[in-house]
Image (spheres, grey):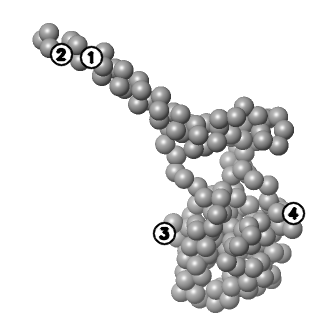
Amino acid sequence: MDSQAPLRPPLAFACFIFLCSSICAANGMYDRVGAAASDGESRRMRLHTDGSRGDAHAWPGYLYTRAVGRCTPQFWSSGAEPWPNIVPQEAAVAKVFGSRSVERYGPRLTLLEATMRTDDAGGSAFVKLVKQGSAALLNAYARRGFPFDSWEVKALLLEALVSEEAAVVQAERFEQANESCV
């Protein structure tokens, strides 16, 4: 029993070091080292698209988060970066992609709502198409070197509306481009 007593302080110390290094690594990974924004703006509370309140650089509610790339629909719907002026969040999908999209998505679905959709997993291929296509359009306007131009995204989305198979294939192409974008 005496042999176990000396092991407790080193074990506790090792756990403390591990936790500190994990927090420091997460702090640097999420770019939360500086106290103020790099452009001189003061940090302020914002209302996020999901209704939660908080700082733009606030810690997540749990330690491990799913990585979200800078070009995914989740990123664009989070409000982490301003949208390109040419396509506001409130713009209707039908106005942006054309009248042929009204039959599939209706006249009131906005680009923000399209990127926020969660019913694409195991759901309709057309839901995934509009979600990934909306993010691809935003990336085409905002990201240099994105593999599609804005006119290509619009044309490819409309062409993919002809069948479910075409929608599946094009949604996958948009998703690959969105996830590999930097």
Which numbered disc flags the more N-terminal residue, 4 or 3?
4
* Dot 4 or dot 2, earlier in sequence: 2
Quote the CA–CA distance across marks 3 and 2. Answer: 53 Å
Instruction: Say which label, 3 or 2, has the lower sequence index.
Output: 2
Q: Which amino acid does label 4 sit on?
A: Asn
Q: In 3D space, how far apart are the residues under numbered discs 1 and 4 (Cα atoms)?
A: 59 Å
Q: How far apart are marks 1 and 3 (CA)?
A: 49 Å
In what element is the residue under mark 3? Answer: loop
Q: Mark 1–mark 3 contact, CB under 8 Å?
A: no
Quadrant hosting residue 146 = bottom right
User: Residue 71: which quarter of the image?
Assistant: bottom right
Task: Determine the residue positioned at 58% across, 68% down.
Answer: 180
Q: What element carries label 2?
A: loop
Pointer 4: what residue?
A: 85
Question: Tag 1: residue type?
Answer: Arg
Task: Pinpoint residue 8: horizontal percent, then vertical percent.
Answer: 27, 16
The answer, for residue 7, to whether it is visible in the render is yes
What number is the disc on residue 8? 1
- Amino acid identity at mark 3: Gly
Secondary structure beneath dot 4 equals: loop
Pick out the residue farthest to the left: 1
Q: Is residue 36 above or below residue 109?
A: above
Q: Determine the residue located farthest toward the right in the rendered image.
A: 85
Q: Nearer the viewer, mark 1 or mark 3?
A: 1
User: Which of pointers 1 and 3 lies earlier in the amino acid sequence?
Assistant: 1
Q: Do the residues labelled 1 and 2 touch (CB within 8 Å)?
A: yes
Relative to 45, does residue 181 appear above or below in the rendering? Answer: below
Q: Distance between the residues labelled 1 and 2?
A: 7 Å
Q: What amino acid is found at the position of numbered circle 2 in the picture?
A: Gln
Query: Is the C-beta separation of discs 4 and 3 under 8 Å?
Result: no
Q: Distance between the residues labelled 4 and 2?
A: 65 Å
Residue 104 locus on image (x, y percent)? 69, 79
